[in-house]
Amino acid sequence: MREAVVVSYARTGLAKAARGGFNNTSNMAMLAHAIEHAVKRSKVDPKEVEDVVAGCVAASGNVARGAALMAGLPITTSGATINRACSSGLNAIAVAARYITEEGANVVVGSGVDSITFQGGGGGGKEPKIVDMYPDYWMPMIDTADVVAERYGISREYQDEYSLESQRRMAAAQQAGKFKDEIVPMKTKMKVVNKETKEESIVDYEVNRDECNRPDTTLEGLAKLAPVKGPDKFVTAGNASQLSDGAAAVVLMEAKEAEKRGLQPLGAFKGWAVAGCKPDEMGIGPVFAVPRLLERHGLKVDDIDLWELNEAFASQCLYSRDKLGIDPAKYNVNGGSIAIGHPFGMTGARLSGHALMEGKRRGAKNVVVTMCIGGGMGGAGLFEVY
């Protein structure tokens, strides 16, 4: 029986959308950087990479194919870009793994990227029929987070406390150097706008760390932030994920091939599941996807040693975590997207790589990556740590 293992992982740091170090760098360039270094770390000959699968929400064309070529992979390496909203990076890893286990490929890259700076999160026209069927289908995600908070009694105070903890955990992890082995510094040309004259200039820059977090966050400061959608709502700039740019990639290989080469994988991809829910409460998607994943693998929540549940918004994280009965001590241990940032198509790949590396540090065996998905879905992936 063939099995797909992760033999390497590399990513960029995360930079603030529009104002950060990637505000003049394309999706394709960021993704190429992550792929190039993931392949180098894998010790695999680039000619052996059959395919690159990339998750991207705000793609212009097939970003995976272009990034593969920019990364120095040969013309014989193919590429496909997929969009399942915020789970795109995880979905890309699942597709890459399946190509190995079911179709006989030996080496495939799974990855994710998004430049919120350039694309603004996508867009496009609305299909009238789906609007008639499900009026909430295109409800902005910030509104769905407010719906979850109100519908399930997730108070503003609870959300702010959670967000502060995300900032604290991420700051502690950053100070301890827990992200350094993941990040490959990338030199860029950053656009800078003079606040007084509005004059634009281009400067040399290097994104060598995650830049979106606010380690000086306080509960008092969070409480002072006004809800984005009005005084009777819940979501603020402090308890939601930050718009950011970045890319991540993992190299997957057939397990016996990795063993034959004397490689030491980070772990194995074991499975992936998705589930649907009401579009207006899309944030609770993990509540439906996780049980489906665990049931298929004969596992219970307590059998999972480490969890990465994407922090799109504090309200949906808290509901999903508490409803599933996940131990907070095993959950988002180094902070999440509220502190780190959330380039939509990249996050699933980042969470997967980080869960494997942190799982190894902690002696974990089973780790789960899960997230809500726009349109009313949840996705969850299971990895075994080596």
Image: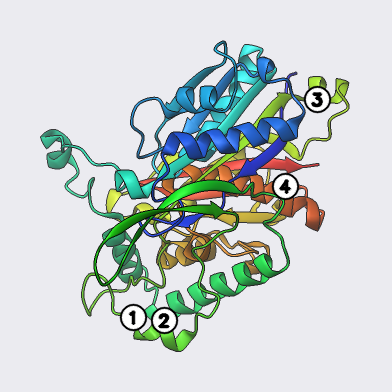
Residue named by callout 4: 366
Q: Nearer the viewer, residue 366 or 39?
A: 39
Residue named by callout 3: 258
Residue kind at label 1, given as amino acid type: Leu
Q: Is residue 226 above or below residue 174?
A: below
Q: Earlier in the sequence, mark 1 or mark 3?
A: 1
On the question of residue 298 being in view, the answer is no
Q: In front of the other: label 2 or label 4?
A: 2
Quadrant (top left/top right/bottom left/bottom right) for the C terminus: top right
Residue kind at label 3, given as amino acid type: Ala
Identify the residue at image location x=43%, y=61%: 241
Residue named by callout 1: 225
Give the colour scheme shown.
Answer: rainbow
Gap in Å between the C-alphas at discs 1 and 3? 50 Å
Residue kind at label 2, given as amino acid type: Leu
> Quick check: marks 2 and 1 in contact, CB under 8 Å?
yes
Label 4 Cα crowd, 10 Å radius (few <14 / some 14-19 / many 20+): many
Q: Would residue 384 be found to the left or right of residue 20 on screen?
A: right
Gap in Å between the C-alphas at discs 4 and 3? 20 Å
Q: Is residue 337 above or below residue 5?
A: below
Q: Position of residue 4 (x, y in %)?
A: 70, 27
Q: Position of residue 227 (x, y in %)?
A: 28, 75
Residue kind at label 4, given as amino acid type: Asn
Name the secondary structure under disc 2.
helix
Q: In front of the other: label 4 or label 3?
A: 3
Q: Earlier in the sequence, mark 4 or mark 3?
A: 3
Q: Position of residue 307 (x, y in %)?
A: 63, 55
Q: Is residue 30 above or below residue 3?
A: below
> Quick check: marks 2 and 3 in contact, CB under 8 Å?
no
Residue named by callout 2: 222
Identify the residue at image location x=13%, y=34%: 129
